Image (cartoon, rainbow, N blue to C red):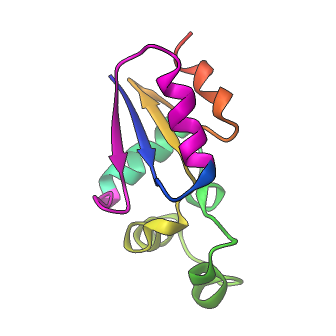
């Protein structure tokens, strides 16, 4: 089953969702701002993305600029920060089985549904 971590207020996330709808595959939508990820879930997603936490942080968010910019944290600390401030997580993220992609641009989803 494909899962998309989605923020309906984000243009890129909406584009990813629309792209996925056009692929005729079953999927589940997770609005991660309403249903925040646990630290374990985020760690699992990062492994599937093959990314470090710092690679998936939205540095243009106000909360990042005010509280975290220029500070050094361990990967575990960044994961905790991201779960406490889910707006900081890049989106959309699409998972299938043991792989995941950051679907920006949306056609990155094709890497999962070939």
Quick check: is 2 in the magenta stretch? no
Q: x, y (%) of residue 104? A: 67, 41
Depicted 25 relative to depicted 105: above or below: above
Residue 33 lies in quadrant:
bottom left
- Check the image and report above or below for 97 versus 42: above
Residue 89, horizontal then vertical, whole percent: 52, 60
Question: Residue drawn 57% across and 9% down?
Answer: 114
Q: Quadrant of residue 62?
A: bottom right
Q: Position of residue 71 (x, y in %)?
A: 65, 84
Q: Residue at x 31, y 61 (%)?
A: 36
Q: How many marks?
A: 0
At x 44%, y 32%, the residue is 95
Q: Is residue 94 left or right of residue 42?
A: right
| In the image, farthest residue toward the top | 114
Point out the stretch of residues depicted in magenta. Answer: 12-39
The residue sitting at 39% across, 66% down in the picture is: 83
Residue 105 visible in rendering: yes
Residue 77: x and y, percent?
A: 46, 73
């Amino acid at each position: 089953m494909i899962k998309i971590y989605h923020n309906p207020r984000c243009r890129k996330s909406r584009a990813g969702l629309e792209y996925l709808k056009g692929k005729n595959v079953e999927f589940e939508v997770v609005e991660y701002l309403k249903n925040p990820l646990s630290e374990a879930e985020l760690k699992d997603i990062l492994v599937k993305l093959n990314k470090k936490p710092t690679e998936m942080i939205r540095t243009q968010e106000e909360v990042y600029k005010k509280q975290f910019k220029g500070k050094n944290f361990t990967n575990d600390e960044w994961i905790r920060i991201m779960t406490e401030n889910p707006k900081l997580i890049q989106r959309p993220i699409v998972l299938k089985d043991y792989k995941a992609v950051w679907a920006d641009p949306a056609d990155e989803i094709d890497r999962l549904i070939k």
